Image (spheres, rainbow, N blue to C red):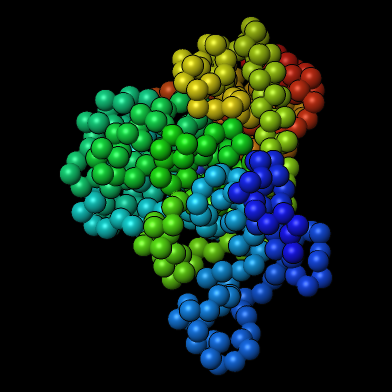
Amino acid sequence: MQKNPNPANWRAKTRAVRGGTKRSEFQETSEGLFLTSGYAYASAESAEARFRQTEDGFVYSRFGNPTVQMFEERMALLEGAPVARATATGLAAVTAAFLCFLRAGDHVVAAQALFGGCRYIVEEVLPRFGIATTLVHGPDLAAWRAAVRPTTKAFFLETPANPTLEIIDLGEVAQIAHAAGAKLMVDNVFATPVLQKPMAFGTDIVIYSATKHIDGQGRCLGGVILCDPEFLKDHLQVFLRNTGPTLSPFNAWVLLKSLETLDLRVREMSRHAEAVADFLGQHAKVERVLYPFRDDHPQAALARAQMAMGGSIVTFTVAGGKAAAFRVANALRLIDISNNLGDAKSLITHPATTTHQRLAPDARAALGISDGMLRLSVGLEDPADLCEDLAGALAYA
Ligand SMILES: *Cc1c(COP(=O)(O)O)cnc(C)c1O
């Protein structure tokens, strides 16, 4: 048994270490990994009662699993959300969050600056099932208002956005969504639950790719949906049970242990990112640096109002387009070329040819993604080593 039975009274760091923990009869200190697909019942009557949901207990791991449940409860406590459900990937979370409650004839408004897979779901998948979608320039509040239709059921956005680190005013957009009778869904991957709490600004549904900072060590994929109990009961629960985008208990265990260090890792990575952004900002070969908490970010004030720190991603542009950006990436000796982010290892990617390759050149231009742009996910290495690596590589720009 836990000694302090009320996690709601714990502060955030304590919740991240102990939230959701349930011990077996062995009183293990590290959370148990329940690699089991099914559960045995004491009697046929008990099986009947569990299926009727008149008796508590697990039924089948597509419906629930002790290790996955510990991860979900810890995530909900950390976010300050009523409930959480885990999924196999971030994109499974986004897909389920939309499809569990939308139907043909409904309408969705989304910011145009979305993670590639999220944009595919909004632009390609939803319309195929009769759900109309409108993409808007996220920071433009008038555009959100103008996009509303009588059938609008959901608003969807990321802030900071990938890779331009554009900031969207969560409180203002939540008001517009609610006035329209729509739910606001926020993909909070770049900010993490440590640096930004979208529900505090009126967001209804928060989504994570746990693959990123939550794992943070490049090991496994995962996703999370956080919402209120009504949305879970009326829409999400039954959809997840019967479509099966379930998180593996093994991955849930890895992610659960990662949450214990999330706060430390994200704050340290943010400090490193700030130092790297300042280094890039004064480098002659760098045309432009984008980092939410830098004074030259066009929405620095809004970023400071919504986020506790600037986050671990720095985006910068070198003169000379794709060729110059490739020369810089190829000359790095420490930082890896990889499209993942939020990892302890610093990773760099060229958005125009990787994460945003699918978009037409004009759509990329509309997002502010130029051919000379590089997105750097700053990790936990010593920032002095990262700056030395970047200095050496920038000589080739
Ligand atoms: C990576 C990512 C996703 C998708 O998550 P997966 O776990 O890779 O499926 C969604 N949104 C954002 C902002 C991401 O960075």
Viewer-proximal residue among 47 and 248: 47
Measured from the top left, where is residue 169 in percent x and y? 41, 27
Left or right of 274 on screen, residue 27: right
Placement of 219 over or under 365, stated as above or below: below
Measured from the top left, where is residue 285 in percent x and y? 62, 10
Placement of 252 over or under 348, stated as above or below: below
Viewer-proximal residue among 239 and 114: 239
Placement of 318 over or under 250, stated as above or below: above
Asked which quadrant contains residue 181, the reply is top left
Residue displayed at 53% across by 21% down? 304
Residue displayed at 47% across by 77% down? 53
Q: Is residue 248 visible?
A: yes
Asked which quadrant contains residue 284, the reply is top right
As drawn, the residue found furthest toward the left would be 150
Viewer-proximal residue among 30 and 245: 30
Measured from the top left, where is residue 319 in percent x and y? 55, 13
Quarter holding the N terminus is bottom right
Q: Is residue 339 visible?
A: no
Asked which quadrant contains residue 173, the reply is top left
Quarter holding the C terminus is top right
Residue displayed at 64% across by 51% down? 7
Viewer-proximal residue among 25 and 251: 25
Measured from the top left, where is residue 158 in percent x and y? 45, 36
Residue displayed at 49% across by 16% down? 301
Left or right of 380 on screen, residue 194: left
Left or right of 277 on screen, residue 98: left
Number of on-image labels: 0
